[in-house]
Amino acid sequence: MGRDLTALFDPRSVAVVGASDDPAKYGHAVAAQALRAPDRRPVHLVNRRGGTVLGRTAATSLSAVGEPVDLVVVSVPGAGFEAAVDEALACGAKAIVAITAGFAEAGPAGLARQRAVADRVRAAGAVLVGPNCLGIADNTTELYLASDRFAPGGVALLSQSGNLALELQLRGEPHGLGYSRFVSLGNQADVTLVDLVQDCARHEATSAIAVYAEDFGDGRAFAAAAAAAGKPVVLLTAGRGTASARSAQSHTGALTTSADVVAAACRDAGVELVRTPREMTVVLAALGAGVRTRGRRTAVFTDGGGHGADAADAAEDAGLDVPELGGPTQDALLTVLWEQSSVGNPVDLAGMGEQRPLSYADTVGALLASDEVDAVLMTGYFGGYAASEGGLGGSPAGGSVLAEGEARAAKEIVSHLVSAPKPLVVQSMYPRSPSCRTLAEAGVPVFAATEDAARALAAMTGREAADRSAGVPPLPSAATPLADPGYHGVRALLGAAGVPFPAAREITDEAGLLAAAAEFEGPYVLKALHVLHKSDAGGVALRLADRDALLAAYREMHARLGAPAYSVEAMADLTDGIELIVGVNQDPRFGPVALVGLGGVLTETLRDVAFALAPVPAARAEALLRGLRSAALLDGVRGRPAVDVAAAAAVIERITTVAAAHPEIAELEVNPLLVRPDGALALDARAVLRRPLHPTTCALED
């Protein structure tokens, strides 16, 4: 159920410690906002000098208030912070909003102070937002404890940046976006992003949750909370381009970045990941329309060829499908359009709008009614006829007759949406025109930029069914730590979980090599162990036909590399096989994250990989494989047979489950995983232990 944050968002009384008449101090801004609703609850201003603040008598301390205070805002210099918190707890405070900075963000000493304060707050049964935050607001309870106002609405905004929150407020205004709540996250010493997402999910007045986060804390818990929220969560985060801090001793480590991990977590949790404040505004405006569908078949409708082509490209760039419309839909369109109109997709009025503005509505109605269409993107001049009447720069041609026709068309489009509710987004050269405002007021997102309209429609059409059903996989119980992190120890660990390998024996001398050769028939593979990227170092010999070839290869390799141990293995049949890579990293924020993709020696060159939170169920693994750029290879090309993708997916589930059950392993990798028409076989494995343990590696075939 999550933590009870009632005292934080709907307190019975509020006190601002550090309230000031000095406009340069934050205590002034917060006190002024708190007094916006003096009749909702008692608001006490506290200043150690007493006197008056904002025309009201200020208490010299919380104790001097003379009555219990439910929520206390602390905006005092760092030296007095702990004393202010202790006094708040002594006066019965159940929630504290800590504006004061200089804690974890200032270094180890500040972190220690912060932890000590948080421990005292939790021990008292209270909650703490911050420190180093900019306040909170709840429009639904008239709680105003931030320096700025937020227009009321349905979005809960949880942000680690105050300025970015203000930008979102400004950008959202033209789209009618408003906010149910605002919380400046600060250092999350006590109340975390996860706590707030869970509480906002329960908040009836919140319809969507917008998050700007630089520090997720427990990223996996955030993803799970977002997946369980039951309402849209939109995330903007920083540092997408930087690699995670790791030794990168495997392909998996080299290929995985923070951006990959966050994107995988968001996809599995159903979170809309955005890159800029503008994109966040676009997505929130789209989600506010309330109409969503799983299908992505999009009809682009325009009154000009250039706009249609541009919108079709933008739609496909956003991940939408723009298929040619079938005969029944084209026939239906031809009954409402004239002969020169294009009805293939994009659908183009070809000038008919200037003759009959209602053709806009007729066309939208036909497209919404079609079983071949999941969503509609209307683009171009619509709005321009009414704009000429409103002095917004539209063409004066046609005058009021066209303006009146366009106004009627806008109302009819709204009626069609009521009859056949599907996602509809409009791009207009005149988004502020009366006709476009009619659409916007009815919940149709309207944008000036084509790329914004396409991104909005992508948010409204949702994701593939496989992505939506993925969710955040639960972690298995921790297994007994890996005792032997060497190559054969890792093979044994995975083999016990059902991962198939060729027969193999570890040897250290010629006698052991000859004994291994007697246990199974050739051809053989010889690998030098404890050699990083041994293919590049000449530490792998393949297709050794018999014992003599194996012995000769060993003598040459040992003379050159002097490895302490070697592995003698049965050579797998590579005929009609495809080499995959399966790896799992322990991410410090999101836990085990899996990578699957095209493997072998070209792994890092081709970089055709996909990511998901581990463990990865077989059905999800198969969807990841089918989503690779090279996925066509799996079904056979140029006369090659299809490989057993289901078998590969089952092995991926076993590998990722093992990795998720062994948090002591920083990186676990199978490369290559050979997939043939008759099954899957792991040809090599590698593990890197987490620090502070010394990384122990085993051989890797590149």
Image (cartoon, rainbow, N blue to C red):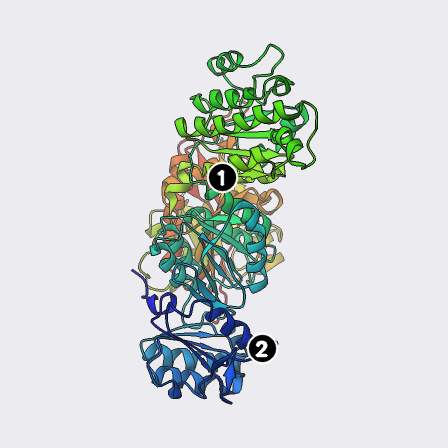
Residue 256, given in percent of the width and then of the height, sits at: 54, 53
Nearer to us of marks 1 and 2 is 1
Describe the element under mark 1 as helix, strand or loop: helix
Quadrant where the image shows the N terminus: bottom left
- Vertical side of 354 occupied by 106: above or below: below
**Left-right relation of 63 to 406:** left
Residue 72 image label = none
Residue 254, given in percent of the width and then of the height, sits at: 57, 54
Residue 465, given in percent of the width and then of the height, sits at: 40, 37
Q: Quadrant of residue 14?
A: bottom left
Q: Quadrant of residue 219?
A: bottom left
Badge 1 amino acid: Glu
Badge 2: how crowded within 10 Å, few (<14), some, or many (20+)? some
The residue that mark 2 highlights is 25
Residue 441 image label = 1
Badge 2 amino acid: Lys
Q: Residue at x 46, y 70 (%)?
A: 34
Q: Residue at x 51, y 89 (%)?
A: 49
In terms of sequence position, does the residue under pointer 1 or pointer 2 come before the other?
A: 2
**Does the image show residue 675?**
yes
Name the residue furthest top.
339
Q: Residue at x 33, y 50 (%)?
A: 497
Q: Residue at x 58, y 51 (%)?
A: 171
Describe the element under mark 2 as helix, strand or loop: loop
Badge 1: how crowded within 10 Å, few (<14), some, or many (20+)? some
Q: Nearer the viewer, residue 111 or 11?
A: 11
